[in-house]
């Protein structure tokens, strides 16, 4: 008997091999699609690093009216994720100033939800940018031959733009409240400062890095919104005629009317 021909399976195998082959091509990084993705990667790093790595403290001066010259600085240390209601005050050598146990008194407010949402989302964006850049650099031909990948990339880009707006706005509002809660108004909220102790606000750590994190949040929103157009151009929505033409290649041509 004649051996069976295996020519039918070869085209599929070759096609699968072509699609799965990794080939480094840096040309996509010179195009807006890849270049903006690199900018988004860097911007996401600055976004979560400037917010997640912050630590500060607020200081007040406690003065005892019934003890002359008995002035002590009371400090509360706070930082990411900004659960201020867990940041208690402490004194030098842990002594009670003006016969007040300051460790029982804390700052006011819990802003962890906005801060953690902002940082967590920035980390996810960072990881997605890495995956997208690997796809662009190593599998660009497979990316452009596929109909699903550009569409998925486009949907993720739109969702990321919206979430950058939401997370950055929420974090900006939380940062404003944090500045108020750790600023000079803190002496109006502490119970000891309302009764036996005369309190004076001394200082609070500069929050310039947190301001930068908000700026990078909205910058990320602009980058992802601008990149949506270039991702859209890779989808079948931008050129459906080319997609339908490629599907009709090799098919039965339509019959012409009489």
Image: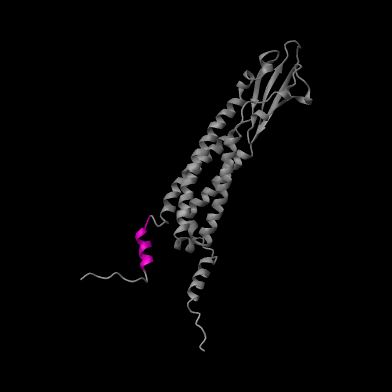
Where residue 27 appears, x then y in whole percent?
Answer: 48, 60
- Residue found at x 72% / y 24%: 104
Name the residue at the front extreme. Answer: 1
Colour mode of the rendering: one colour
The magenta segment: 238-248
Q: Main secondary structure of the magenta part?
A: helix
Q: Is residue 73 magenta-colored?
A: no
Name the residue at the top extreme. Answer: 66
* Residue 36 visible from this viewpoint: yes
Nearer to the camera, 149 or 63? 149
Q: Quadrant of residue 105?
A: top right
* Residue 46 visible from this viewpoint: no
Q: Give the number of callouts.
A: 0
> On screen, 28 above or below 227?
below
Query: Left of 204 or right of it: where is 136?
Result: left
Name the residue at the bottom extreme. Answer: 1
Where residue 154 appears, x then y in whole percent?
Answer: 45, 52
Nearer to the camera, 44 or 204? 44
> On screen, 107 above or below 54?
above
- Residue found at x 50% / y 76%: 10
> On screen, 69 above or below 89?
above
Quarter of the image for the C terminus: give it.
Answer: bottom left
- Residue found at x 69% / y 20%: 61
Where residue 85 appears, x then y in whole percent?
Answer: 65, 28
Where residue 137 appears, x then y in whole percent?
Answer: 52, 60
């Amino acid at each position: 008997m004649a051996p069976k021909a295996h020519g039918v399976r070869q085209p599929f195998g070759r096609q699968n091999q072509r699609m799965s082959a990794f080939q480094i091509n840096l040309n996509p990084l010179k195009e807006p699609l890849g270049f903006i993705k690199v900018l988004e990667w860097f911007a996401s790093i600055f976004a979560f690093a400037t917010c997640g790595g912050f630590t500060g403290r607020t200081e007040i001066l406690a003065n005892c009216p019934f003890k002359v010259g008995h002035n002590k600085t009371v400090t509360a240390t706070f930082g990411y994720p900004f659960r201020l209601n867990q940041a208690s005050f402490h004194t030098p050598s842990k002594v009670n100033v003006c016969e007040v146990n300051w460790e029982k008194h804390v700052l006011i407010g819990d802003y962890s939800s906005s801060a953690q949402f902002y940082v967590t989302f920035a980390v996810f964006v960072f990881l997605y940018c890495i995956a997208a850049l690997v796809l662009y650099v190593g599998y660009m031909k497979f990316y452009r031959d596929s109909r699903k990948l550009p569409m998925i990339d486009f949907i993720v880009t739109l969702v990321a733009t919206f979430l950058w707006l939401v997370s950055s706005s929420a974090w900006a509002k939380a940062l404003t409240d944090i500045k108020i809660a750790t600023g000079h108004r803190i002496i109006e909220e502490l119970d000891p400062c309302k009764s036996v102790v005369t309190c004076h606000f001394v200082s609070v750590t500069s929050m310039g890095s947190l301001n930068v994190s908000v700026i990078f949040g909205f910058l990320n929103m602009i980058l992802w919104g601008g990149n949506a157009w270039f991702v859209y151009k890779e989808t079948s929505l931008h050129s459906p005629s080319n997609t339908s033409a490629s599907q009709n290649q090799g098919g039965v041509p339509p019959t012409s009317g009489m």
